[in-house]
Amino acid sequence: MILLGGMPDDPKWNDLQLEASDLVEAARPRLVLQKGCHKHRRGRFPAMPFGISHGGGQPRPKVLNQHPNNRLVLQELVESESLSRISGFANGNRLPFWQQSVLIRFTRPLSNVATSAL
């Protein structure tokens, strides 16, 4: 399924993207890069899994483990207003208008997984 949402009608959207980029760049020297984080299918840059995972043979969804030094840095990024707004726009702000029943079926189980896995 692909849903193209465009960009928000917000004159400060470009500034928001620059702020998000600055946050990621500021976080870079604070992160401990694990072995293998440069080898993945997304491109030639380090990538760190974060959040909830399900698949690959695991029996149930789980919160991904992080190096202790990375937990705070990644949580700060996730909680930042700029990245939260970008992620919200990319991942969900169009879904309620397009298919509300899908949104409800997705968000309820996801919040249960996040709560029970911590």
Image: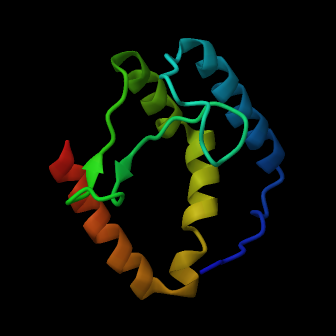
Residue at screen point 52% across, 18% down: 31
Q: Residue furthest top?
A: 29
> Image check: 95 left or right of 65?
right
Q: Quadrant of the C terminus?
A: top left
Viewport quadrant of the N terminus: bottom right
Q: Residue, x 53% and y 33% (percent of image)?
A: 77
Q: Name which quarter of the figure residue 65 lies in.
A: top left
Q: Position of residue 92 (x, y in %)?
A: 54, 67
| Residue located at (57% from left, 83% from top) | 97
Q: Nearer the viewer, residue 42 or 18?
A: 42
For residue 65, above or below residue 109: above
Q: Which quadrant of the structure image shows residue 102?
A: bottom left
27 in relation to 79, above or below: above
Task: Give how far across and how far down residue 76 sits, in percent.
Answer: 47, 29
Residue 31 is left or right of residue 4, and the answer is left
Q: Nearer the viewer, residue 71 or 77?
A: 71
Q: Can you give x and y, in whole percent of width and height, for residue 13 in the image?
A: 78, 49
- Left or right: residue 52 versus residue 97 is left
Left or right, 106 with reference to 22? left
Q: Nearer the viewer, residue 52 or 44?
A: 44
